[in-house]
């Protein structure tokens, strides 16, 4: 065998070679993390108690999600057959795309939005059709309607959206579903708790509507990787064919009932974030930093050409924020997660110091 032959390795599918890559900004966990839109405080104390009750013997068995799916279904007011728990909302998106997208199909996507939609569609033989929001980053409702074609198979709408924090109204979502009866309308409600409005009550009523949720944000369970997909039984049966029966681990399943049971903690955290959001908006206005209206646990701000230096200065002050300049229509814009009022007081100090440095021309050149 020649030396050249020994260096050859199996080639992946051309589709995989062409996939977009996603590199999360991990690291520096000792800083105030306002870059991932996670719960910035803690999970419910009841969740920690539930973890303490997990026996060593239970970890030897494969997880059983169906009993917990029945609990979450009752919590949401839908039938158990209409809900599938997933390994984070990312798996819900990935599985949905795998179940429904074929060659020649189109994923219709308003942008900017959650990066992983385009990553996961690039793993299929379908293509993404993007609808760019205007500079105000409001939901491009009319342009989205105009972009629906017979090839549209899935329409994915994050509501509230990231990184903008903008929303689509219930009426707009219903009209989109009506205009595209041949397509699945996925409404991703990852930030639902900070917005307070949902279309979950329409699951099974609107025949092509599916709703995704995550427990990584308000519930503070990002490390357990737990999400869900809800939809009509007729659509969920195909999702379940693609979904691994063991992708949600036993620890996550043991903790979910406890998280759902602690409404007092959840309400406290959501109220704390909403109050902190209002205070941080006021601080941004006082510092004359342009911002976008947000209904989520983050705010997108306009920094301009110095966005990279702003992120560096904030990090030096112990606060991590997310540069979104690579997103369509977001050049010079930075997203800042909202935590508790105490945490955001620290962020306000860092913000003011960083902006003063930039305006004085003291930043890096």
Image (spheres, helix red, strand yellow):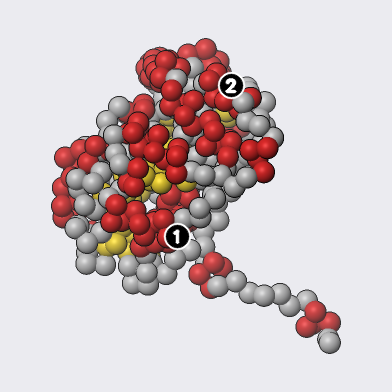
x, y (%) of residue 266? 43, 21
Front in this rendered view, residue 225 or 58: 58
Element type at mark 1: helix
Residue 267, visible in the rendered structure: yes
Front in this rendered view, residue 146 or 44: 44
Q: Which residue is mark 1?
A: 242
Dot label at residue 303? none
Identified at 26% across, 67% down, the residue is: 151
Q: Nearer the viewer, mark 2 or mark 1?
A: 2
Quarter of the figure with residue 54: top right
Relative placement, left or right, of 197 versus 301 is left
The tally of labels here is 2
Q: Is residue 17 above or below residue 352?
A: below
Q: Which residue is mark 2?
A: 49
Crowdedness of circle 2 by 10 Å Cα count: few (<14), some, many (20+)? few
Instruction: Residue lying at the far front in this picture: please name it.
Output: 57
Identified at 36% across, 28% down, the residue is: 193
Identified at 51% across, 28% down, the residue is: 220
Identified at 52% across, 37% down, the residue is: 253
Element type at mark 2: helix
x, y (%) of residue 111? 35, 49
């Amino acid at each position: 065998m020649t030396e050249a032959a020994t260096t050859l390795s199996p080639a992946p599918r051309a589709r995989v070679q062409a996939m977009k890559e996603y590199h999360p900004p991990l690291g520096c966990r000792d800083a105030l993390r306002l870059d991932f839109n996670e719960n910035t405080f803690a999970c419910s104390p009841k969740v920690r108690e539930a973890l303490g009750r997990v026996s060593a013997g239970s970890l030897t068995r494969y997880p059983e999600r169906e009993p917990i799916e029945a609990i979450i279904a009752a919590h949401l007011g839908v039938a158990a057959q209409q809900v599938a728990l997933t390994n984070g909302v990312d798996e819900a998106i990935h599985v949905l795309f795998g179940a429904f997208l074929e060659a020649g199909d189109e994923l219709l996507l308003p942008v900017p939005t959650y990066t992983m939609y385009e990553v996961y569609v690039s793993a299929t033989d379908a293509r993404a059709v993007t609808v760019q929001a205007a500079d105000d980053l409001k939901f491009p409702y009319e342009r989205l309607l105009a972009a629906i074609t017979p090839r549209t198979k899935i329409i994915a709408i994050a509501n509230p959206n990231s990184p903008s924090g903008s929303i689509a109204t219930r009426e707009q979502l219903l009209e989109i579903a009506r205009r595209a009866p041949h397509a699945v309308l996925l409404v991703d409600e990852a930030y639902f708790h900070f917005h307070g409005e949902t279309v979950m009550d329409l699951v099974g009523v609107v025949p092509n509507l599916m709703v995704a949720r995550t427990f990584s944000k308000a519930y503070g369970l990002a490390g357990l990787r737990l999400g869900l997909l809800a939809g009509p039984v007729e659509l969920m049966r195909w999702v379940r064919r693609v979904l691994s029966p063991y992708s949600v681990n036993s620890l996550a399943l043991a903790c979910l009932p406890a998280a759902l049971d602690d409404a007092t903690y959840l309400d406290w955290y959501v109220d704390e974030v909403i109050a902190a959001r209002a205070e941080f908006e006021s601080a941004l206005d006082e510092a004359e930093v342009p911002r976008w209206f947000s209904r989520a646990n983050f705010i997108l701000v306009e920094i301009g050409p110095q966005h990279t230096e702003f992120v560096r200065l904030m990090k030096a002050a112990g606060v991590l924020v997310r540069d979104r300049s690579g997103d369509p229509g977001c050049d010079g814009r930075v997203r800042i997660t909202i935590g508790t009022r105490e945490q955001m007081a620290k962020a306000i100090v860092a913000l003011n110091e960083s902006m003063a440095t930039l305006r004085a021309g003291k930043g890096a050149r």
